[in-house]
Image (spheres, helix red, strand yellow):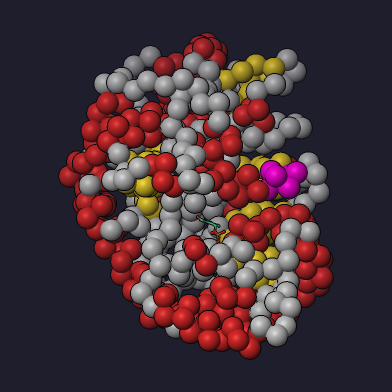
Amino acid sequence: MDERATCGHSGGMPRVLTAPVVADLIRPTLSAQGVGPAYLRLTEALRHAIADGRLPEGSRLPSERDLPGPLGLSRTTITRAYAELRSQGYLRTRRGSGSLVQVPHVPGGRIDHLLTPSALGEGVLDLTCTAAAAPPGTSEAYQDAVEDLGAYLPGTGYYPGGLPVLREVLADRFTARGLATSPEQVIVAPGALAGVAIAARALLSRRERVLVETPTYPNAIATLEGAGARTVAHPVDHVHDDWQVTELTRALRSSGARTAYLIPDFHNPTGALMPAEQRRELGRVMRALGVVPIVDESIVDLPLDGQPVPEPLGRHVPDSVTVGSVSKSLWGGLRVGWLRVPRARAEEMAASRLKLDLGVPVLEQLVAARLLQDAPQILARQQARLREGREIVLAGLREHLPDWRVRVPRGGMALWCALPASGSTALATAARRYDVALAAGPNFAAGGGLDGWIRLPYVLSPEQLGQVAPRLALAWADVLAGRVEGGRDARGEEARRIIA
Ligand SMILES: Cc1ncc(COP(=O)(O)O)c(C=O)c1O
């Protein structure tokens, strides 16, 4: 069986989309289609919704008998549109299961150089990674930490929960943000992704469902699936910062997922920020259903427009597990992250951690503790740098690619752009000719699709960022002119796991 066909709502019964839900979802695109045969307009509207992940891979469309009513179209129109989608590879029919959404394979474009960054070569603009250079002061923090290290050398150096001094700093930071935390509730891990792995192994059993946003951070999908879980994709309306709580609740109920992995703060890749009101609402839902969220706060320290970030989602679900790190706010090379766990789960999480590794290097923890104490000044500089980068890429897009649509994110490190047509994977392939490395939209798709989207990080130097849009314009012209070749990428699934 095709591996990818299972990744949206993996295995088991497909998610059933009712006729009114599908009709509501595609109506705006349908009315925007203008003139032309009704079945082609419907095909295009459905294809659009599949490509951008709103109709997740593996879900079941309403029967050809049920859809005409809510859409005001004839049954013949629906039948012809479904046939067209089938011939284009967007639907498959399984006996007894009706018409299931699938996303056709797209050629090339996956990026797998991160394990050996030098493979990209000099002069290549690496847009596969949302991570910045170390801030000024990092080198001094290392030198000071070497002095501090002396006090630890007589001991064994094993601190599986983390150095007390760092746990204390982290607990204070949570408490200051409104989530009262004691150092015993903090476990230091080698990065936020390691935090997700620890939480996933503790919370999820084999084949259990976990709800994730789509798009989402690709390595988290791999980590959750690596822990044996099956992902249930929930599309988020990032343009309006809307987590669509009613739909999310429905997805939790129908899938039976008791764990959710969420990035409410300047979500990667979209930059969306969950509003305070939706945090409260979602908190109520999760408490009622007994769902434990793994809240990934990796990007919470990067608001760019001076707005206050709403209180942590974890505040509304006492049983939640929160993960974070200094990778985005300070430097990825430190490999220092953490989990904040409920008291009742502290032992279970500590045990899960010990199954993965025995701790983070003492020196790096000391550096992180020092840098975090100076965080306000360092972060202000990082944010200014990112604001400048965001403006350069946006200005470039306005000039060179005016028909790409992008909502200015209020924080984070990347733009999430809607291309005027599907072709993100082809774009990533074409861009390599112009020395640009990209992670195509489908890498971020939990439920398949998203080939009409591309993520553009703005973390490089201003000079480099100034070249992004002109080079992408050349690559996009190649895509539109059909000058992109490439067979199926056999390594696709493996490769998406190492995009940052
Ligand atoms: C949402 C999110 N979580 C986790 C990570 C990985 O963080 P770390 O390097 O701390 O493991 C990233 C990196 O891009 C991310 O965007």
Q: Is residue 202 left or right of residue 65?
A: right
The quarter holding residue 492 reads top right
Residue in the image at 68% along x and 55% along y: 197
Q: Residue at x 53, y 76 (%)?
A: 368
Residue span colored magenta: 224-229
Q: Position of residue 338 (x, y in %)?
A: 63, 69
How far from the left and from the top, in percent, is residue 341? 71, 70
Q: Residue 88 in the image: x percent, y percent? A: 49, 16
In this view, 392 is above or below 351: above
Does the stretch in magenta take in 423? Answer: no
Of the pair 201 and 74, the residue shown nearer to us:
201
Up-down: is 473 above or below 268? Answer: above
Residue displayed at 32% across by 41% down: 436
Q: Quadrant of the N terminus?
A: top right
Residue 227 inside the magenta-drawn segment? yes
Q: Is residue 83 visible?
A: yes
Residue placed most toward the observer, 27 or 203: 203
Residue 34 drawn at (x, y percent): 32, 25
